[in-house]
Each structure stands twice: as structure tokens, then as C-alpha cells.
Amino acid sequence: MAYNAEVSSYFDNSIKAFTVPDIDNGYIPQGIAYDPASDSIFLTGYMGNGSESPIYIMDRKTGDRVKKIRMQDEAGQKFNGHSGGLSVLGDKLYVAGSTKACMYVFSLKELFEAEDGSSVAAERKIGLRTSGDFMRVSFTSCDDSLIYAGEFHKGAIFYTHASHLVEGEGVRQKAYLMGFLTDGDSAVPGKVYSIPDSIQGACFDGDYVYLSQSKGVLAGRILAYDLNDIPQSGTKTVLGKEIPLYILSEKNAAKVTPIPPMCEELVTADGKLYTIFEAASNRYIIGKFMGLKSVYTTPVEYFR
């Protein structure tokens, strides 16, 4: 399939890491994460037939599927939600709870010890809702110390809490990427980034953060930011706590790179950016003809 020159450049600078498992069997990709301790790639999303949402564990070097885990919530009930993203920090895997305004926390040890095809329950649920605020967790990320919950805002259907509006100096944004520490079953906000509309994923990599932006069947974009160039812009009260605010806008991105459509989460490993695309699922099909049935890797320098 023909692409414009800018998107063709993405393919010219990328290689296929591995074929997305079950991409022709109802799996709708959403999340991707990396565990450096095991050199494993984790994938999540949801199933078109409404069955339990999967967690796939992939061998990063070989691209082989190690196993598929069927998600259960903290009460041991089948979870078939959107499961928009996941991140590894320490010995835990954090999975986005979407409209339930929470993250589910899984034990990596339990996931690795579970049998292929079995169901595993979350150890606990971290709520991201107070009486005056909430965060729909559409995707996740992490840095060396914080877990991040990211929101997807687009029009009236995919909305966020009214207090998340940030405007001024030509910027008007309604979504957050909030970093927090965990304290038992609750989240303790530490910092918050205001982000543009239609962001599907975020990845922190040293002094950089990358955002994937998807606008339907049109070409997507990777927005790269050098965090050394992003000053604090006052504070915001999130989930009842006043924390530092930083603004990531389309205007202050260090570089904006066109990519194929419907990119979801992204993660870095070994100096490469891994991207996964929803467009090749049976729900959309169009990506099957675009070569998007694979996870791609691209040198991070290409996006800087």
C-alpha cells in the first residue's frame, strides 16, 4: 500500500520485531510494556468476542509468545474491559482500568509462574477517583520512580473531568498524564503533565517522553519532548492534592514524526521505540493491508 513520503520514512527506519499474537483471532491491541529483569515484552488489550482481556508475555529477543494470561479483577471476577495499557515497575505490572478510573496491580512472579491460558487475578486495585475528581486511565507509563496514568480526550464522547482543563498562551488541553506513588490501595499524586487530545500512549526514556497521537484512519504522530526544556507551569489539584504542573503541547514538542494510523501504546528497550497498532485487528481490518500486524521497532534517535 502506498504511503506519503513521511510515513514511508517510518517504515524505512523501522523493523518488524514480531507478529502480534491473535491479531487475526479477535485480539484488539492496546498496551505494550517492557520488563528489563526478564527481557520480556508485555501486551494487553481486549477481545472482540467479549471474553477475558488478555495479557501476553513475549520473549523480546526471539519474538516468541511465552504465554497468554486471562485477566481477572481484584475480586477474581472475569475482566473483559478495554485494558488500554500496562507498565512494569519493580516486581509489579500495572494495568489500566479505563472507565473504572483505576489501575489493576498484578504480581510479575505470579504471571510468570502461571500456566499458559490460565486466569490470574489482580492483587489489588488502585482507585483514581475522589468525590471531586476522577481519572479515566486510558494508558499507562512509568519512569524510575512513578507510575503514570494517562487520559484520552476527544470531543464529548471521550471526556475528562472539567478541572483538568489547562489553557493559556495558545494552549487549551483537557487531558492529564499524572504520575503517582502507590500507598497501599491508593494513589499519591506526585506530578502532572497536561497533554494534547487523542493521545493513546506515553513512554518516558531518560530525559525524553514520547506521546503517540492517533486520529482514526489518518496517519498518526509521535510527539517527542526533551523534559529539560519543559518548565513547571504552576500547580494543579489532582485527586485532592496540589502537585507540580507541566505542559506538553503540540507547540512545544521537540519533534513531531508522522507514523502509520492507530498507534496505541509505545515503550523503549535497548535504544529502540516499540510501537503497536490497533488498525490491524479484526475490528478495523485496514491495518492488515498496511503491514501493521507486527510490533515495530525504531531507533529512538529517529524521533528526536
Image: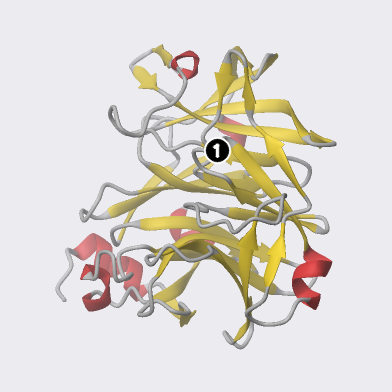
Residue located at (48% from left, 49% from top): 201
Residue bearing mark 1: 100
- Residue 292 vs residue 8, the one in the foreground: 292
Residue 94: image location, x then y, percent: 68, 51
Residue 159: image location, x then y, percent: 38, 28
Q: Which amino acid does label 1 sit on?
A: Lys
Seen in the image, is 45 located left or right of residue 207? Answer: left
- Residue 10 vs residue 125, the one in the foreground: 125
Image label count: 1
Seen in the image, is 174 located left or right of residue 259? Answer: right
- Residue 232 vs residue 241, the one in the foreground: 241
Q: Is residue 42 above or below residue 92?
A: below
Dividing the picture into quarters, in which one does residue 77 lie? bottom right
Residue 62: image location, x then y, percent: 61, 88
Q: How is the image coloured?
A: secondary structure
Residue located at (26% from left, 70% from top): 287
